[in-house]
Amino acid sequence: NDGGDCDQIGTWNSSTKTCTLTTNVTMTANGVAISIPYATGITLDGAGNTITGPGSDTYGNDGVYVSYSNNITIKNLVVQDFKDGINVTQTNGAIITGNTVSDVFAYGITVYHTVGGTDGTFTITNNQVTNVGENPGSARSSIEVQGLSGNGACSGTGSVVVQGNTVTSGYGWGINVDVENSCINNNTVTGKGSGIHISGPGYSNAQSNNNI
């Protein structure tokens, strides 16, 4: 909440609680590149910079890992060569938009479960996710959303929206959603083993204008 180690890789604006990257980040060993734990209202703005992992399919190799937080924004970031690209867990409310994720082993963007019984508002929009699931054994989903509950609409407080994303190439599912009352709209999935998979309470999801 006070910027943490942001000044090592970017600039911190305390009034907007925004960390804007000013350099690329390269991981030479296994681990998380950028971790955001127990935070509220933080924005990570990649400003087009790239986070590169060690190219290892090792558990815990995440480009960005958000946990036990509230209303986090991750935008304009390029993430490549991790096990998971952007991983948001046990967090109430997140915006993940305008990111490029490529060449990861398991999940490109994953959002699951919440804390405190309040799901919050989640929007996963306008991301480019390419070559996720580099081999069949480790492949999961390019975009994975589970354990949440939306408001049945494509906007508004409490909505869960997966919209305007482009998913290409790699093994596994393109988009996998296990969320009731979510919105899955205007996504494009090509070159994947499977397109959009809806499980669990997914029968109540709103789907339209998706290209597979």
Image (cartoon, helix red, strand yellow):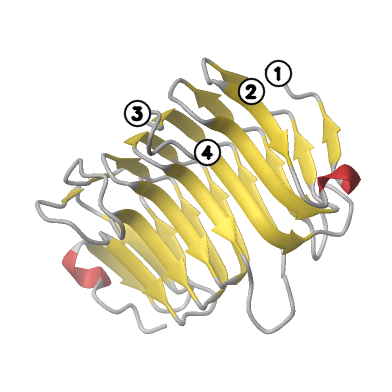
* Residue 99 x/y as whole percent: 45, 41
Mark toward the viewer: 1 or 4: 4
Mark toward the viewer: 4 or 3: 3
Q: CA distance from mark 4 to mark 2?
A: 14 Å
Tag 1–tag 2 contact (CB < 8 Å) = yes
Q: Is 110 placed left or right of 35 in the picture?
A: right
Residue at 62%, 67% (x, y): give it.
113
Give the camera-side residue of 124 and 31.
Answer: 31
Asked which quadrant contains residue 143, the reply is top right
Mark 1 neighbour class, 10 Å CA radius: few under 14, some 14 to 19, many 20 or more: few
Residue at 36%, 84% (x, y): give it.
2
Give the camera-side residue of 204 and 91.
Answer: 204
Looking at the picture, does residue 118 appear above or below residue 56?
below
Q: CA distance from mark 3 to mark 2?
A: 22 Å
Q: Residue furthest front?
A: 137
Label 1 residue SS: loop
Label 2 residue SS: strand
* Residue 84 x/y as whole percent: 38, 48
